[in-house]
């Protein structure tokens, strides 16, 4: 008869495989709904920098899931929540990676092919498009008017040609400010995605704060609060906020601006790593060590540590945005009147 640990491993692997099968079925089903290319179709492949994000996700998620399965002690009372976590990491991360690699926007006389909210292929006809927006959250163009929004990433191999096609086929619709002729980022999809990433962090800092606070509150259901560990986690979060806050406050130097920006990001990463590792060590020490921690306690300690870090990061960004609202406004994207790259 198989041991409980062996049954748990097989059940988790089956859950991962089930997620993969459901994802493959959903992709095939969505792909069949997209009209065929036709003679006048033009594909716009993703840029290499975006496409190569797919393979790490395909292998990283299952790798972390296997790490949890074989190296983290799991008790019977923790099997159900841990099962869903493993299925999420080992099942969903490869699907996200595959979705990125398979994304290939296409334009023809009938309409536009992009991705839906779940990353599945989707189609919208030109007459149905009612609005075009630049989404900082996804670094994509959002097309409204169909049953669901359609997204096209701005990191395309021939981004200027894609923008030209939109202007030709949608002359009656106002395009986003980032696509206007006088905007500095109009012809640089990579830079637009980079600036959009940080602008999305500024725009959605309030949501990040709320979600992080909820995660910390839920973790306290499994763990007693540890003020010192929380303080170290908050210090790690301050490290994460170092670059996004200062990049709009410090004037860009004439020389070595990229080096300065990379150095600040590296310093923030070091502070975050040291702070969160210290917090994790303090929590495990208070519980008697990792050898006696249950699986739920281990996940709760991780959630509490990362949640406090995200809470502190979002709080500092909200404070900076409140103090200097003009510095973190969307109109500042791509401006060269101050701020680091």
Image (spheres, rainbow, N blue to C red):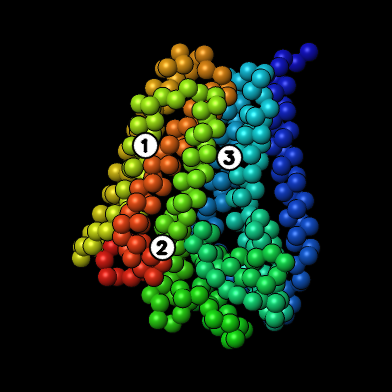
Q: Nearer the viewer, mark 1 or mark 2?
A: 1
Task: State yes or no: discs 3 and 1 in contact (Cβ < 8 Å).
Answer: no
Q: CA distance from mark 1 to mark 2?
A: 25 Å
**Nearer-the-camera pick, 212 or 4:** 212
Question: In the image, what residue occupies the spot 60% across and 86% down?
Answer: 172
Residue drawn 75% across the image and 46% down it? 22
Whether residue 97 sits left or right of residue 306 in the image: it is right
Q: Which residue is mark 1?
A: 234
Residue 285 at what x, y percent from top left? Answer: 41, 17
Closer to the camera, 118 or 46?
118
**Which residue position is annotated with label 2?**
195
Question: How packed is label 1: few (under 14 Cα within 10 Å), some, or many (20 or more)?
Answer: many
Gap in Å between the C-alphas at discs 3 and 1? Answer: 27 Å
Classify 10 Å Cα crowding around label 3: few (below 14), some (14-19), many (20 and above): many
Q: Which marked residue is nearer to the observer: mark 3 or mark 1?
A: 1
Residue 208 as seen in the image, left or right of residue 31 = left
Mark 2–mark 3 distance (CA, rounded to whole Å): 27 Å
Residue 110 percent location from the top left of the image:
72, 79
Q: Is residue 269 visible?
A: no
The residue lying furthest to the front in this view is 322
Q: Which quarter of the picture shows residue 178?
A: bottom left
Please say whether residue 232 is visible from this viewpoint. yes
Whole-percent x, y for residue 92 in the image: 64, 44
Q: Between label 2 and label 3, give the one nearer the viewer.
A: 2
Position of 235 relative to 129 (above/below): above
Q: Earlier in the sequence, mark 2 or mark 3?
A: 3
Give left or right: position of 77 versus 313.
right
Residue bearing the label numbered 3:
61
Q: Nearer the viewer, residue 60 or 292?
A: 292
């Amino acid at each position: 008869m198989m041991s409980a640990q062996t049954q748990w491993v097989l059940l988790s692997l089956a859950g991962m495989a089930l997620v993969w099968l459901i994802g493959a079925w959903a992709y095939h089903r969505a792909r069949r709904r997209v009209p065929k290319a036709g003679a006048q179709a033009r594909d716009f492949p993703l840029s290499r920098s975006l496409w190569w994000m797919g393979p790490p996700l395909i292998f990283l998620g299952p790798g972390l899931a296997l790490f949890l399965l074989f190296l983290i002690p799991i008790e019977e009372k923790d099997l159900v929540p841990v099962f869903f976590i493993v299925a999420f990491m080992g099942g969903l991360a490869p699907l996200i990676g595959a979705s990125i690699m398979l994304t290939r926007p296409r334009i023809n006389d009938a309409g536009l092919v992009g991705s839906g909210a779940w990353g599945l292929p989707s189609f919208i006809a030109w007459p149905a498009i009612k609005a075009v927006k630049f989404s900082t959250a996804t670094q994509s163009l959002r097309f409204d008017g169909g049953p669901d929004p359609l997204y096209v990433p701005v990191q395309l191999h021939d981004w200027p040609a894609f923008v030209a096609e939109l202007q030709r086929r949608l002359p009656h619709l106002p395009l986003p400010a980032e696509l206007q002729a006088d905007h500095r980022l109009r012809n640089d999809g990579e830079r637009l995605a980079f600036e959009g990433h940080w602008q999305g962090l500024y725009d959605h800092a309030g949501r990040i704060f709320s979600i992080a606070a909820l995660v910390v509150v839920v973790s306290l259901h499994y763990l007693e609060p540890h003020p010192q560990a929380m303080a170290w986690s908050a210090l790690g979060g301050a490290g994460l906020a170092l670059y996004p806050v200062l990049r709009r406050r410090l004037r860009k130097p004439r020389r070595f601006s990229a080096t300065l920006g990379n150095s600040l990001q590296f310093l923030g990463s070091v502070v975050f790593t040291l702070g969160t590792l210290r917090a994790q060590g303090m929590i495990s020490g208070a519980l008697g060590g990792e050898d006696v921690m249950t699986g739920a306690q281990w996940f709760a300690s991780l959630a509490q540590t990362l949640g406090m870090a995200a809470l502190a990061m979002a709080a500092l960004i909200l404070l900076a945005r409140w103090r200097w609202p003009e510095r973190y406004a969307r109109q500042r994207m791509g401006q060269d009147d101050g701020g680091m790259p």
